[in-house]
Image (spheres, rainbow, N blue to C red):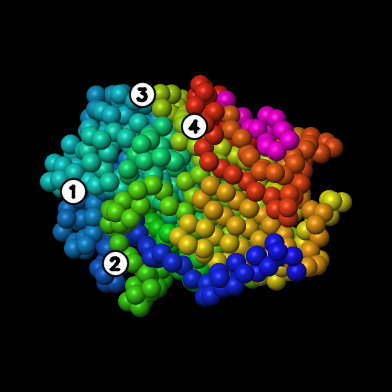
Amino acid sequence: MNLRIKTWVAALLVLSGPVRASGPDIVNVINFIRGVEPRGPVNLVEPVQKQIELARKHRLPTTWLIQYDALIRPEYTELLKREMGPDDEVGAWIEVVQPQVEAAGLKWRGRYPWDWHVNVGFTHGYPVEERKKLMDVYMAKFKEVFGKLPKSAGCWIIDAPTLNYLHDQYGIEAACNCKDQSGTDGYTLWGGYWNQAYYPSRLNAFMPAQTAEQQLNVPVFRMLGSDPVHQYDQGIGSSWQGVVTLEPVYRPGGGDKKWVDWFFDTNFKQPSLAFSYMQAGQENSFGWPAMSAGLIDQYAKLAALRDQRKIRVETLRESAKWFRDTYKTTPASAVVALEDSKGDPNRSIWYESKFYRVNLCWEGDQWRIRDLHVFNQDYPERYLEKVETSPVATYDTLPVMDGFHWSKPGDIAGIRGVTAGSEPMRTKGVPTVQENGTESLVVTCDLAAGGAVRFRCDPAKLAIEVAGASARSDWGLELGWAKDKQVPVADVGKHAISYRHQDFGYTLSCGSSEVSRMDGENKIRIKEARDAVIFTFEADKSSSSNDGKTTGAAAPGS
């Protein structure tokens, strides 16, 4: 056994022990309230009433986020003031509606009093100064109704100027936005913190900041609870994704008791580093009949876990306060799914830090890095000054591997381990996952041909190593994408890959590994060096020379 193998074995012995999350398991119950629903007849008050009763029955603190059209209607506000729990909070849901626009002295351009198209129903459709007016009107009405200003705000998509203004002018302390999705409901959020929470850059509400100086000190929590195995690949080859989340109206998803049990076990019984997080609840637009069975099941299970002191159920504001008190910049976190809800041999591990996110996935004995995005606080969002004139919007980070947008059915993108002859590096058995300190995750899996592959996820570095007396030494990584897909690879150097996305340049450093473009235009080979390939992700200082120009709102790689 050589010195390198001895060192690795010693490290694994140090890391051995029970597989468990080190941080707290946190649940926010967030129900947001609309005042109108133009898509069909539905009783919008009944869900709020039933959700209040259910939360009071189980003593679950709840965050109620109220849209302006509900804020001006006593049937909602008086119900909340009269019946919500003593530990509940009321916050702002900041989609834009007709009475709010008109109260701000602006012209309503929507098809209905609430129009979900981005250019009218979200702040992105208005100049920055008009966004501020819309927030002024909202906050004045909220204070008139509830006697104080809200401390939490949420929306499917939030632009940086609006979020900055809500904090700087009105003291908002907590925020939440939609899960990652592509094209669903007309907007894309892609490449961000997969779950948990992050401090955003003041230039980009979707981008984690790297420094305390440029971050907005409002933790942004990701909503809806995505299936860590199956959500990502939903709809490859199409223009939008399906939904596999904790929302109780979806099956598979939060309306399926078996799926919920699996999702809770995945979140609460596996390593998560800083903390595990999920958002439960449902918007009232779906109506009570559609959500009732799933919500009743989830609330009972959450209450039981709370009573067993296995989880914390608290308001969004409380979680944000804990986050700010505990972390000065965004901490590393993880979501580990070593079992598939369907019983298939599929596995998915998400790791995220303030520098990057990565997803390791297994389909049987084949593994790949399905997703790898770089975070850079200097990459501006499209809506710092721009007004969105179309029904859709896009938020993204910087793709190194985008296994959804760079794939086609039957031609799936990824970074894969291969031998010198391009044979896939197959694994066997279930990976083991260990936390190393508070910010690092180590994933180890036996190789079918002998030896083992280890992935070490550190905050600014990702190392892929192969070791063992019988392990092959002629291996490397193959970064590939579907033929005819346009990807932002700008140049392939000897030890690095340069990218340019939305006119923003960034580099993937591969350490001592040699990098080369393979025959054909859709594969890059990264050769191991001393039994490892090491990627580093600290913010590229050269990015400060970028002019921040944008070229529209198309999804990455489309």
- Residue 443 in the image: x percent, y percent? 61, 63
What separation in Å lies between label 3 and label 1 (alpha carbons)? Answer: 31 Å
Of the numbered discs in the image, which one, if any, rests on residue 127? 3
Is 440 situated above or below 394? below
Earlier along the polypeptide chain: callout 2 or callout 1? 2
Earlier along the polypeptide chain: callout 3 or callout 2? 2
Q: Are marks 2 and 1 in contact (CB under 8 Å)?
A: no
363 horizontally vs 145: left or right: right
Q: Quadrant of the C terminus?
A: top right
Question: Nearest the camera: 428 or 186?
Answer: 428
Q: Are marks 4 and 3 in contact (CB under 8 Å)?
A: no
Earlier along the polypeptide chain: callout 2 or callout 4? 2
Of the numbered discs in the image, which one, if any, rests on residue 60? 2
- Residue 91 in the image: x percent, y percent? 26, 48
- Residue interval drawn in magenta: 486-504
Earlier along the polypeptide chain: callout 4 or callout 1? 1
Q: Amino acid at mark 3?
A: Pro
Question: Nearest the camera: 154 or 440?
Answer: 440
Of the numbered discs in the image, which one, if any, rests on residue 379? 4
Residue that appears at 32% across and 43% down: 217
Q: Are marks 3 and 1 in contact (CB under 8 Å)?
A: no
Q: Dot 4: what SS?
A: loop
115 horizontally vs 544: left or right: left
Disc 3 packing (10 Å; few <14; some 14–19; many ≥20): some
Q: Label 1: which residue? A: 74
Disc 4 packing (10 Å; few <14; some 14–19; many ≥20): many
What separation in Å lies between label 4 and label 1 (alpha carbons)? Answer: 43 Å
What separation in Å lies between label 2 and label 1 (alpha carbons)? Answer: 24 Å
- Residue 417 in the image: x percent, y percent? 74, 54
Q: Dot 2: what SS?
A: loop
Question: Nearest the camera: 313 or 350?
Answer: 350
373 horizontally vs 519: left or right: left
